[in-house]
Amino acid sequence: MKNNIFLWLAIVVVVVTGWLLVPNIFWEYAFFLRIPLLLGVLLLALPAIAEFILPAMLKNLFVLRGIWQMAFTILGATVAGMSVIFVTAIVIDNAPTRFAVPSLITSSPSWYYGLAIALTLPIVLAITDLSEEEIGKKRWLGLFIGVVFGAIFLLAFKWIRNVLATWEILNNLLVKVFSFLLKNSPAGYINSDGNLTQAHVNAFAFFLALVVGYWIVFVLYPPGTRGKKGEAAALLYVMLLVSIATLFLGGLTFYFDRFRVSVLFFWLLLSFGMYWLFKVDHFFHLKQDSLKQKNKQPELQDFKTIIDRRLQKLEEYLKTNKQEELTEEQKRTLVIVCASGGGIQAAGWTTQVLTGLQDEELLGTSFPKAISFISSVSGGSVGSMYYLDRFDSQGYPPNTELNQIFNSATADSLDAVGWGLAYPDLWRIIALPILPSALTPQISDRGIALETDWQQEMQVSNQPKTLATWRDPILDGNLPIPVFNATLVENGFRLLISPMTFGESIKQKYFDFNSLYPDDNINLVTAARLSATFPYVSPICRGNKDLKTKPNYHVADGGYFDNSGFVTTVEWLNNLLNPKDSRDPLNIKRVLLLQINPFPPASSTTQGKKNRGWLMTILGPLLTLFKVRDPILNARNLTEVELLQQRWQTEKTLEEISDRQKIDIQYFQIFFPSEKEAPEFYNEQGEYRPPLSWKLTKKEKEAIQHGWNAIKNQDQIQKIKILWRDKWNM
């Protein structure tokens, strides 16, 4: 304790002494340079933050797929570094005139390029290192091309600057424009000769070159070009955002600091005013539903008849394959799947488990034929969408499509999100809300950009399927009933998005999409995106129509309410099994409940870490909320299963309900393998840290596939196999 007191005193002495010894001019310039300093530190620290602090969210930004992505991203990093340097030069050169402070140093264009390269270097090194598994030795070619592109850009900037300096008419025009705009305070902009200062000429020339590059990327690489000419990397869009933020905010602070005006406050006020004035919001696209106009709505609520058709198709399939009459043990087996959320990791694991169980060495094609209901959340919804997209008229996905299902679910989509952030979403936040409607009417934000990318991986990429597209296959018994679970922001209730109609919740347990939007339909990729509105990656949004009879809720990720999809499953199953009259067509014998979890089970032996007092003081409450989610869901789901089994497997309870026979309900959780089952996927701290964003590396995709291989011969999967093939004789 005594040593700690002396250490504290030593730190206080060092800080106070440093404050007193550092000249006041240093702190004054640190304030005027706050924007380029902060963004410059961001450029230097971003690789370390991505790799060591927020790897699940940011690390894969630095994993690029080809030499051209690498080259253009290096160019973008060079531009970002130059932006920081030019704003710094403006402040250092002109602060004495504008703010009446002593001169700090005399800047020279010769050091611009050296400092810009220094700011760019950590990002270039991180790209070169982390992209090795994707690009291999070709990354050195990408590095060379990127350096060449950076040199060409700097030469182009230098040429534009020389034109501005020698073109007297243009120079005079710029002086008049700046003089008019700054007539109340031109100090620091116009020098004693009546011309723009050299630093402002440099920055203006650089701004023109940046605008040209920004527009070229906008035109050449909108979402939906993956199959044609590839996509620009998400990291390139981050670099563009850093460049624009530096010039935009740096320019504003240089002007308004003279008047002691808070740029941040007035910018937020202006942005809020524009949002309010133009009624700016994020929307998902609703379209007219022709199926509902054909008076098919009653059929969409008749779950018992639809499940009966699905089970009949299964019985016909089994009878044909076995070429004999079915025994009682083979009849009426219902499979229900719950796919938990967890970003692209969940999408990949969901498809890997479902396609893996279809292997003839495990459950065979009778397994997908028996699936009648899939309740999914977030990333699990994306995986379920791609899985069901490949179902054919036989009622299951052909074996030839299984690899493509996994590839589609794990395809990169982070680049499309980056485009949405750098263009339509940026225009909104800098108070230009009209531009997205004028320039990007079809892709109005990053959420629609994400949908556009997902659509490319559908079986038919150029003709988007809708919820209505799936209704006929469901009504015919050829497709399981899917539910994409989402959350309504205004009241916190679940939103069930499905081709089927669940009706109004009598006890207000949920809201149903078809009841909220009785005349409308949405694309399947939209339904999955609403369920997978991962915080800040895709925006919370509402329908693009003004509803007269019902509120137009904002829709968020389904994981806010229930990240497992199990609540919807239990409610639906209880309603399905509960007979309403003697004509009830169902006579279900068995129910197999599968819960697909994309992460390892929570360990009860995890030890607390020492020396985390500061972290726990600041982030402890949020960290606790995050950590308790999976154990709470697991404990609740196990309790729900016990109640289900007690209700439908206990003789006394069944007598109170009906005269039907007992139903054998079996529940299995399929987790990503634990450290004991697959230690190669875990780091030295015993942690498995997959990405949560919409991008996987080759190794991370292989980890999902190898993870399945690691558990498919383990006890849990083998128990399912024995139950399916031997006990239930399927």
Image (spheres, helix red, strand yellow):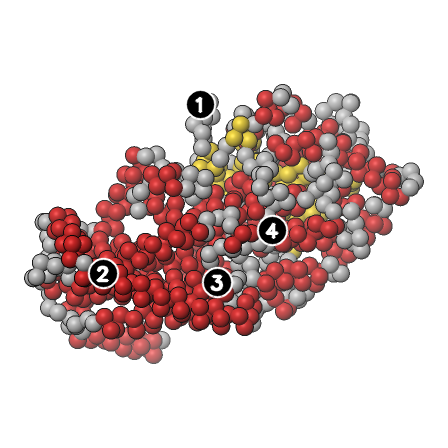
Q: Which residue is mark 4?
A: 409
Residue drawn at the location 56% of the way across and 37% of the way down: 523
Q: Are marks 2 and 3 in contact (CB under 8 Å)?
A: no
Q: What type is the residue that disc 4 sits on? A: Ala
Quarter of the figure with residue 712: bottom right
Q: Secondary structure at mark 1?
A: loop
Q: Are marks 3 and 4 in contact (CB under 8 Å)?
A: no
Quadrant where the C terminus is found in the figure: top right
| Depth check, front residue: 298 or 233 | 233
- The residue singled out by tag 1 in the image is 548
Secondary element at image label 4: helix
The mark that comes first in sequence, 4 or 1, is 4
Residue type for callout 2: Val
At 31% from the left and 63% from the top, the residue drawn is: 156
Q: Which residue is mark 3?
A: 68
**Left or right position of 190 against 163:** left
Q: Residues within 10 Å of mark 3 (few under 14, many from 20)?
A: many
